[in-house]
Image (cartoon, rainbow, N blue to C red):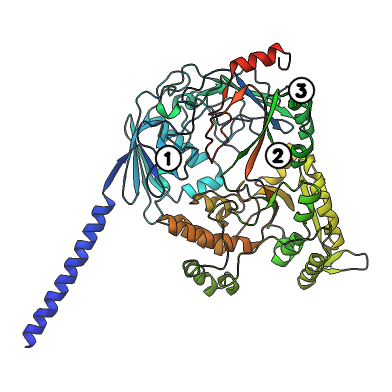
Amino acid sequence: MKSVAVARVRDWRLGVAGMVLMAALAHQARAEDIITSHGISTFGDLKYGPDFTPDYVNQDAPKGGEISMAAVGATWDTLNAYSIKGVPGAGATLPYETILTGTADEIGAYYCLMCKTMEYPADRSWVIFHLRDDVKFADGSPMTAEDVIFSYEQFRDHGLSDFRTILSTQVDKAEVIDPLTVKFTFKPGVPFRDLPAKMGGFPVFSKADFTANKRDLEESSLETFLGTGPYQLDKARTVTGRTVVWTRNPSYWGEALPINKGQNNFDSLRFEYFGDPNAAFEAFKAGAYTFRIESSSKNWATAYDFPGIQNGTVKKDEIPNGNKASGQAYVFNLRREKFQDPRVREAIGLMFNFEWSNKSLFYGLYTRINSIWENSYLAASGVPSDAEKAILQPLVDKGLVPASILTDEPIKAPVSGEDQLDRKNLRKASALLDEAGWTVGDDGLRRKDGQVLTVEILNDNPQFDRVHNPFIENLKALGIDAKLMNVDDAQYENRTQPPSFDFDLITSGAQATMEPGDEMRQFYGSETADNSSYNVMGLKSPAVDALALVVEGAKTKDELVTATHAMDRVMLAERFWIPQWYKASSWVAYYDQYAHPEKMPPYALGQTSFWWYDAAKGDKLKADGVLR
């Protein structure tokens, strides 16, 4: 009996070993199931097949004409959009293309533009791009695999430091397989989900031009790199600091591609610079430029009654926008000791009265932002689901977030009354500052350890003064020494970018994407807090760091949504912002010489891409003396 029992145990062990081996082989086989495709989607299938033309474009759109727009800012001084040095001219990325491109009616879908096909295994641990043999740089020279790898290496070694920080953890090897084939292999242990698309998203420069002319990705320059894009700098019409003009390359290699039909329709794109928004608006009314995206509710509600609107030569339109809200907000500089206490940040946030501002200043046209992913299905709502709790519980167990995050609804912006100064919120804010040790002295100012609590709002847009000043008055009522500091664009750029970060509060945007991945570490990760132009608030949160990895590692859309909801809750609890407002549409005005597709896509306005010029209408405007 004993020998039989031993035999059975031995057989069982061999059986288990066999099953383990078969499972391992099966996993390896799944990982090595090679997918060859014309594109890649984060989750699910691509909407379009090979050689497609997007549904939303007018395939017969005429080519020609010019569209001109305003850039509000004192000046520009560089055409290198990939350096933190200088202020880039508008459209500075137009000369460049990427191997993959997206569409305006999908999220997380990327299609071959400069490649014929791409290959990757089921686990996405590497990707191979088979490049087209007809891609040409603007000087007519062919683009090859060497240019792709060279461009990748430039971004890896000389690109923005926060981007390099993330990239260095992801790519193990980048290699030229042959003149038209490149391969990227990713480091074991990192989430592979988004990396094939990321490797197809680098702008590609000419290695020969870069080397011969000693270009530098980190330095400011008034020269563009040599790219493959449909538009190139018009040097004759461009005036440094005042005007940037991009003209269509008549020999653009991709003109006949199905994916480009109905796009890149204008002969030239012109950007005119103005020192302030009022000057820009007056210039539009005078015809100095012809297409305007309105950002002021006051203008939209009251100022579009000038003769051009009345006689029909200027059209005013509101076009739905399906993108997530911009995340516009007052952002704290968390590097400052006075803002380390979340009670201080909450108290200051209570003093911004959105309801009064919307009624008194914005003509009731805006909606309050309450989520990093506002206006999307990724915004957290209600109490956490069981799946969210499973993600959040370990953070609670480690003491990184309060237990209330498992039972409470996400933190929302405070609601205020009709008066500019809401007394209820004032009392709550006062109690919070008292608890934090900032007590009121005989002079009405709050102090802690002998230091007055000061808050300076740094501003480079005079149109925002009417918003900032009531907020400052409310802060003063709380006992805070608050002031508005207006500076020019150059000063603002210097004070809000690394390494200076010399501000208390600025109006910025809480960055996020509709399919978040590794960029969340770039936007909010502790490793980028002191060197990132995105993580401008300087957030260092172990809880956010942990959740960013969960988001990045989500393998299905349901997993991503759940992880993002959890991350949204935790980020809102950090109170690094005072959310402002958004509008789920674009306000546009333009001289009646442009047209757009009847079926507009949800995720792009596309005025420089799939709108077009109506020559007959343009000629009439000139003949009538409306435009020169």
371 shown above or below 599: below
Please tell me which residue lies in front, 622 or 84. Answer: 622
- Identify the residue at the far bottom of this view: 1
* CA distance for labels 2 and 3: 19 Å
Asked whether the beta carbons under mark 2 and mark 1 sit within 8 Å of each other, the answer is no
**Of pointers 2 and 3, the one earlier in the residue sequence:** 3
Asked whether the beta carbons under mark 1 and mark 3 sit within 8 Å of each other, the answer is no
| Residue type, mark 3 in image | Ala
According to the image, label 2 marks what residue?
295
* Left or right: residue 370 compared with residue 199: right
According to the image, label 1 marks what residue?
110
| Disc 3 element | loop
Mark 2 Cα-neighbour bin, 10 Å: few <14, some 14–19, many ≥20: some
According to the image, label 3 marks what residue?
286
* Mark whose residue sits in front, 1 or 3: 3
User: In the rendered view of the protein, which quadrant contains the C terminus?
Assistant: top right
* Left or right: residue 69 compared with residue 253: right
Please tell me which residue lies in front, 531 or 517. Answer: 517
**Of pointers 1 and 3, the one earlier in the residue sequence:** 1
* CA distance for labels 1 and 3: 41 Å
Give x and y (percent) for residue 137.
45, 23
